[in-house]
Image (cartoon, coloured by chain):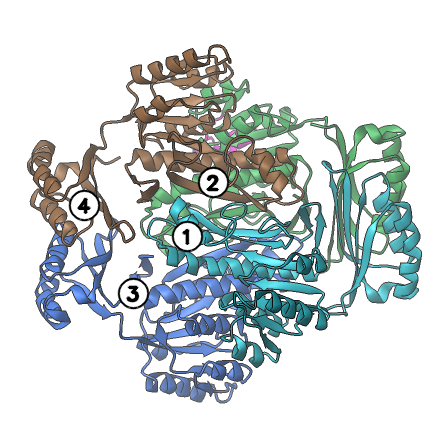
Chain colours: A blue, B green, C brown, D cyan
Amino acid sequence: MEHTLRLVISCPDRVGIVARVSQYVAEQGGWLTEANYHADAESNWFFMRNEIRAASLTHGVDAFCEGFKEIAGSYDMEWQLVDSNIKRKVVILASHASHCIADILHRWHSGELDCDIPCVISNHENLRSMVEWHGIPFEYVPVTPETKVEAQLKIMRLTLAAQADCVVLARYMQIIPPEFCQAFPGRMINIHHSFLPSFIGANPYQKAFDRGVKLIGATSHYVTETLDEGPIIEQDVIRVNHRHSKDDMVRLGKDVEKAVLARALRNHLEDRVLVHGNKTVVFD
Amino acid sequence: MEHTLRLVISCPDRVGIVARVSQYVAEQGGWLTEANYHADAESNWFFMRNEIRAASLTHGVDAFCEGFKEIAGSYDMEWQLVDSNIKRKVVILASHASHCIADILHRWHSGELDCDIPCVISNHENLRSMVEWHGIPFEYVPVTPETKVEAQLKIMRLTLAAQADCVVLARYMQIIPPEFCQAFPGRMINIHHSFLPSFIGANPYQKAFDRGVKLIGATSHYVTETLDEGPIIEQDVIRVNHRHSKDDMVRLGKDVEKAVLARALRNHLEDRVLVHGNKTVVFD
Amino acid sequence: MEHTLRLVISCPDRVGIVARVSQYVAEQGGWLTEANYHADAESNWFFMRNEIRAASLTHGVDAFCEGFKEIAGSYDMEWQLVDSNIKRKVVILASHASHCIADILHRWHSGELDCDIPCVISNHENLRSMVEWHGIPFEYVPVTPETKVEAQLKIMRLTLAAQADCVVLARYMQIIPPEFCQAFPGRMINIHHSFLPSFIGANPYQKAFDRGVKLIGATSHYVTETLDEGPIIEQDVIRVNHRHSKDDMVRLGKDVEKAVLARALRNHLEDRVLVHGNKTVVFD
Amino acid sequence: MEHTLRLVISCPDRVGIVARVSQYVAEQGGWLTEANYHADAESNWFFMRNEIRAASLTHGVDAFCEGFKEIAGSYDMEWQLVDSNIKRKVVILASHASHCIADILHRWHSGELDCDIPCVISNHENLRSMVEWHGIPFEYVPVTPETKVEAQLKIMRLTLAAQADCVVLARYMQIIPPEFCQAFPGRMINIHHSFLPSFIGANPYQKAFDRGVKLIGATSHYVTETLDEGPIIEQDVIRVNHRHSKDDMVRLGKDVEKAVLARALRNHLEDRVLVHGNKTVVFD
């Protein structure tokens, strides 16, 4: 992959932002390989993502940042300049189900997901061998009603010790304590096995089966303190009919879950997802 | 279209139903052009739809029915034999929006929907000319807070006077009184402009926009006394993203609404939809 | 709809184009409601579409254009500034089939397609009443083997007399002579009833049926002199299976055709489609 | 999974087949868990698949088969009775690409594909570790221009030695010699990385990119002696646009390829795919 810098910006909308930013990028010799803008009319907010060839910056990255601070200040920007050569650390939390994690690990192994995976943490042992085959440490943290709080603390400590930039809940079926959510705002990604906001909470396939829906879905979203209500990153659906039992729905749903989670994670890792309020802008 | 008879059956499941029915059909000389079966494991219920060439019945339709009664009795069947030559009477209720009704009328006009449309009833005048161009009487029944009950009664009387077999709510935005629902069980079809059970009730596109979903949908269902909770016949979705305003969603959603309603209505008219509890079997 | 100006540009790619253009827009007081950019790595070509609030330009449109000429010149730009208040004239050519034209006319009638339709030209009389109900002149130009050339000339003359900006072939089943194609480069839109490049030419549904494909599709493209080989604007598909006869495919395909053509036409009318070589950039 | 017997039949269509077969099944005490029928009007051919609870047969499987022979004879049936407890042996041929085989192996490992995999054969070594981790023998058969014929013979011998019921070409990029195709009629499954019949042969993503299509696809089909022209089992597509490079198409296409191949293989293993001429009936 080419070495690029991603300049990601959000700020109140007003005339001339694109001009000011792109003029600065040009002054610095920056060659744009991709540029995306979005002005949200409702909230009057502006979003921007520029991908710049690292080698094209005449004075280097530090000088670029130094100079950009002034622009950022005068436009009240939230911004970051991400170096594509610095890999994010993604800690994965899993439970018993293997489909999402197997899919992520294979994509990572074949170079499709540009990140490091310092460890996988699970409350079951069954995935150990698969994870370790990929050369990734596997941390087993059993969760019982008695040890729940302790286990949660341990998982959080392991995640922080791994210096995680991002946490992926790959069908991790346990509740995440608020302080853990707060430690990873817009950086903890869940896959929920329904087309949210339908079928929030437990057993969504059973609920979908009982309601007799003709499509089932999956939703990847950032985790917030309110269960299944965080900003949605990606969703998809698959057609079902009266011949499908609840077990068929579970099976068919797996394919949607893993595809949706993979797309969400890849877009997150490429800094294509900007959170604003409880919604996302996804520059894919 | 070929002249056929549709033998539609539902009953408690047990061994030998297919054998008994198809043996009888064969004895009567019946040539099956299509046959569908479904055994619902959960409720232990059996569903069957046979399409038989009318001309192939050696002793005619009446003899067929007479003889079938015995079988039906011994298996506790709900059943009907529908003659494809007898067109259903479909009364359409509409409001101001034109997309669903324009789509239905064009399909009907070009021979894609096999039914009669004795009248269209609306609480707005704006669709009169379009409806009348198709040679269909247009009944204007204004609804105001003061005249609401009266208007509802008038609409129901007009529908009954038209000897409707089926009522279609083509984005008719008024509440249907319980007695009207009860008069058309499994024969009143609504199109709701969301992917149910998400966004029940009013303003689903606004709710979808506010939630930041990545797909919007539409649902066609039989009307029951509980708003937007009847048996689902058909659903579909379309992809949206951060660039779409609520008005864009309304516009894009129209295409999904009209396609979903048309598919539901066509399947209903061909006796492909069997209701069981709050779910449907759709032999499409 | 808001009054906007669409600045549409394509030129060889180099550093600083976005900066130069957006700086100029900002200098002129231009408030961007939407901005899209694409750099094609393969051909090293740059594409840009800016939508600007007309009222925001401090010195008006003429001054804007005058000043922009210099920039355009120094970057070798092909460009245009389109006023959203000036409606394009769209001449529609149709044959016997009604689904595409009925769909376009309804969208136009309900305000979804922002254009004028000076006339519909057809080699059949059957659509006259529908077209005239919409208040649009209907020109009947029969085509027989003997009168073919003459008829083609007449159709071309009628189109030019109507001062068409754009020609839509709404399932017009006749060959378009080269000089007619050449008169409307990138402005004549066809809908082909297959997923191109599969099933070029006549009877695509029969060919799809014979090949046993599991999806059928439709393709909207700009017409060039080579049949069914022009730049593709939009495509979509629908699932079929062994139960579908060729006639079912024709029926199901209609819904795809009309949706695909409507999306292509809308994007064309909003200047969202940029042609480069035999491909399109679609800023939707 | 429940122990069932699958009675799969195809024969010339005539009145009374369903009656005769289902009467016989009922006489034998057979409890149908699923039944599918299709009469192809074009070829006047009849297709049937009955899934019967093994335990329900009063006189056992052998007696069932013995008695059925007579019916089969009198209706000119091709038929088989497949025992769901006897696992098919599936030999997988792979090349360098890992996505399809990783997906199949994970589905197999998690119990979603009901078969044995006696070995994976590849002309590259890179997948050995992944395959062996699953406990499956990996056979490396390098193919060079000089050793091509020898290598093909070796692969065929290995496949026959493994007593393969079915061969899966999981992005195996080598030509299959005619005698190998002939040895597995309707039992050798390929995944082609385009929406056939578009882009037959090599480099379909490059061709799709060059043509500027707006959807890319994948096709799973039975292998015949004519390249990419065998009966299609399953197809699917994914949307692309001008922002996608050829490499993006390759990446996105992988997800379609593996999903399409998995669905085709699963349906094949459950005896849901019936070949007739160059088309398939898929009772899914």
Vertical arrangement, residue B185 with respect to residue D71, above or below = above
Residue B175 appears in the figure? no
Residue at 89% x, 31% y is: B63
* Marks 1, 4: nearer the viewer: 1
SS under mark 1 = helix
Disc marking residue D206: 1
Q: Where is residue B150 in the image (x, y as percent from the top left)?
A: 52, 30
- Name the residue carrying label 3: A271
Q: Are marks 3 and 4 on the same chain?
A: no
Q: Are marks 3 and 2 in contact (CB under 8 Å)?
A: no
Instruction: Give x and y (percent) for residue D181.
Output: 67, 57
Mark 4 residue element: strand
- Report if the CB atoms under discs 2 and 1 are less than 8 Å apart: no
Q: What stretch is highlighted in magenta?
A: B141-153
Camera-nearest label, 3 or 4: 3
**Residue labelled with disc 2:** C196
Q: Distance between the residues labelled 2 and 4?
A: 36 Å
- SS type, badge 2: loop
Q: How far apart are marks 3 and 4 (CA)?
A: 24 Å
Residue with the mark numbered 4: C32
Residue C72 at x, y percent in the picture: 13, 40
Q: Tag 3: residue type?
A: Asp
In magenta segment, residue B146? yes
